[in-house]
Image: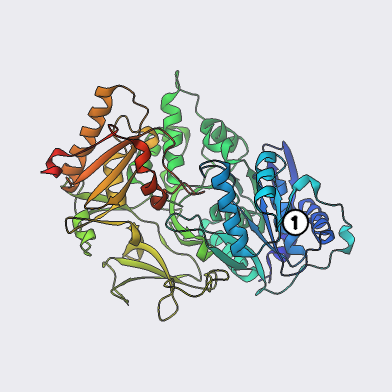
Amino acid sequence: MTATLLQLLESRGGSSTLTLVEEDRRVLLADLLAESRVTAAGLASLGIAPGDRVAFVMHNGSGFLRLLFGAQYLGAVPLSIALPFGYGGVDGYVQHVAGILADSGAGVLVVDPELKRVRGALERAIPGVTVLSADALPAGDAGRVPAAPADPEQLAYIQYTSGSTASPKGVPVTHGNIVTAVHALASASGSTGDDTWGLWVPLFHDMGIFCLLTALGTGCDAVLWRPRGGVKRPLDWLRRFAAEGCTHTAAPNFFVDALVSAVRAEEPQPEPADLSAWRVWCNGAEQVNARSIEEFQKTFGSWGFRPQTMCPVYGMAEATLTVTFSSAELEPRLRWVDREALADGRFALSTEGAPNARALVSVGTPVPDIAVRVCADGAPVPEGHPGEIEISGPSVMSGYYRRPAGDERSPDGWHRTGDMGVIADGELYIFGRRKDMIIVRGVNYYAEDAEAVVRDLPGVARKACAAIAAEDHMALVVETALTGEDERAALIAACHRQLRARMGLSAVTVHLAPTRFLPQTSSGKVQRGKLRSLLDELGDGRGAADPAGAA
């Protein structure tokens, strides 16, 4: 096995081709690596030395990859920062970036040329850091760049977590971590040099960058879009995906819903694309929804999409992405369970349509070199018992960058994920986050359960809703485009009916919010801590308590 990411990529350079959709460019990996060495020379002329941290804010594209690989050629440590969307304006974004720069100790920040206004704000707000546009990097002599580092223990990248439950933390990723993770994902997904990955997920997110590195490191071709190319125009993306002969992709569950909604919104119904070559969709980064998968198959089965192609997965930056993977030879598996029993720490099977029934979708079995266990009350539990998921293996980080050890590791060294799950017949099922448990009048509820029972109601925009704790009750924020007073009142009443009927939950206040209101991380997860501070913005009259709950 090759020791470092660069060695692995150089061994594939002549066989992998990267298509950059927005750049209207197709480039051999070998040529991209040569361009990266020129970028390395430019960074060196700025005084960047081995071990220095180099931060950058870049759109998906060749510029992102040149900075990533260029820093690595110097033995420096690259770290990418999320693009400036969803941070409450420029001021909020500047604060976010400043926190990451201070945490990482990066002295240089390279910004995409298209983000001129943001770059100016960063220059003014962070005087101790060299901020420059990517197109202003000094020219350098690539011939003077030293040979790529060959130490698998050398730090290759710092991946900042999305911050769904806390401020972002740096995950230090070594070359050995990445090479191990690439081989694990390639093996689990059945990737070979005959495959083509089509990806729009942002490269600053762990799903985006490590899936792309897996594609290139396995000798696959890859087609790369900017996120807007997928999210804003999903059917255009799908047609190009099919036309390019793509066999693999990775995207969160919300994109399943987006594609279904896009087809149903078209009049007349669109001509089908041929999806028969599509072999693997890694559905992860957020909760996998059983109904979404069912509706997708109903919609796209006639286009040649096979149910086995949908592969629910589980991963995280702390594991250099993939933890578990569903078999590409089996249809997604689900189990109906009693949601009240789960909240009480028990795993009890139920049936579809039964009171308190909830569908859990399997996210598969551990990938090579990863071990998974479930723990409760500080000790591992046998199959069929719910608890917190813990992981161990050579691709799992040793600790957060430049931070003292906290409660993220168990006494015997396993990483505590904070996710709650259960193993049944060797497969992992996830049902919530440890910190997203909401206690109402002494009864435990998972936020994901409340969201699941209202997300498909008519009037809920983009299926977007979020539940959080609010003193002695639950607050449910529901995005909607409805404007009529009667329509809004009916939606609030429908939410209450669903929560009472499906969960026996009455102590709830429903807040109606405009579309795109919910604060989200770079991967689309709701920032529940930030949402609590935004409830006052919704004002009086936009929400209502359940009369039954107020009694």
- Locate residue 271 relative to residue 488 in the image: left or right: right
Write down the residue under mark 1.
13
Can you tell which quarter of the image residue 549 is in? top left
205 or 301, nearer to the observer: 205
Residue 422 visible in the displayed image:
yes
Along the viewing direction, whichever of 106 and 27 lies nearer the viewer = 106
Q: Is residue 334 above or below residue 245?
A: below
- Element under label 1? loop
Q: Position of residue 41 (x, y in %)?
A: 83, 58
The residue positioned 41% from the left and 44% from the top of the image is 307
The scheme the figure's colours follow is rainbow
Quadrant position of residue 459: top left
Q: Position of residue 88 (x, y in %)?
A: 51, 42
Label 1 crowd (10 A; few <14 / some 14-19 / many >=20): many
Q: Nearer the viewer, residue 131 or 337?
A: 131
Residue pictured at 30% horizontal, 21% vertical: 484
Farthest-out residue, top: 268
Looking at the picture, which amino acid does disc 1 mark? Gly
Q: Is residue 16 visible?
A: no
Question: Horizontal placement of 119 versus 417: left or right?
Answer: right
Image quarter in which the C terminus is found? top left
Residue at the limit of the structure toward the bottom, as seen here: 412
Q: Position of residue 323 (x, y in %)?
A: 47, 63
> For the view shown, which residue lies furthest in the left direction?
551
